[in-house]
Image (cartoon, rainbow, N blue to C red):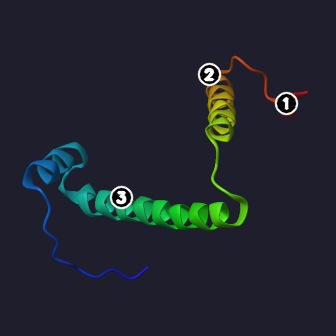
């Protein structure tokens, strides 16, 4: 992917905190990744708006079910990483 230099204005304290964490060489990569994540969130927000327009608003109960499923999957993933749950492919 081609790159181009841009000038942006950032809060100095925030920029310096990030630069201290990632180093000067990683700063552009960090900002690029943050912009990509924000763009994904913007697209997801548009999709949710479309979905709710077609099917009605997502209810609190539906959100609770989705969150419980997300947490379950996250737990399963963590368990597999630590080796506490056998990999199904191994059998």
Q: Secondary structure at mark 3?
A: helix
Pointer 2 with pointer 3, Cβ within 8 A: no
Q: Residue furthest top?
A: 84
Q: Is 16 rendered above or below residue 70?
A: below
Q: Secondary structure at mark 2?
A: helix
Q: Which residue is mark 3?
A: 34
**Marks 1/3: CA distance?**
35 Å
- Where residue 83 appears, x then y in whole percent? 68, 21
**Marks 2/1: CA distance?**
15 Å
Quadrant placement of the N terminus: bottom left
Q: Secondary structure at mark 1?
A: helix
Q: Is residue 60 left or right of residue 4?
A: right
Q: Residue furthest left?
A: 12
- Looking at this view, is 23 or 15 the one in front? 15
Between tags 2 and 3, which lies in front?
A: 3
Quadrant placement of the C terminus: top right
Q: Which residue is mark 2?
A: 82
Q: Is 89 rendered above or below residue 6?
A: above
Q: Is 1 rendered above or below residue 42?
A: below
Q: Quadrant of residue 49?
A: bottom right
- Tell me the crowding category of disc 3: few under 14, some 14 to 19, or many 20 or more residues within 10 angstroms, Cα based: few
- Looking at this view, is 10 or 3 the one in front? 10
On residue 88, which mark appears? 1
On residue 10, which mark appears? none
- Where residue 36 appears, x then y in whole percent? 42, 64
């Amino acid at each position: 992917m081609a790159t181009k230099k841009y000038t942006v204005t950032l809060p100095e304290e925030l920029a310096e905190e990030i630069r201290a964490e990632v180093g000067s060489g990683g700063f552009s990569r960090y900002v690029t990744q943050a912009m990509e994540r924000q763009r994904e969130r913007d697209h997801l927000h548009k999709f949710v708006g479309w979905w709710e327009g077609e099917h009605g608003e997502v209810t609190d109960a539906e959100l609770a079910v989705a969150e419980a499923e997300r947490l379950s999957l996250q737990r399963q993933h963590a368990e597999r990483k630590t080796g506490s749950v056998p990999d199904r492919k191994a059998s």
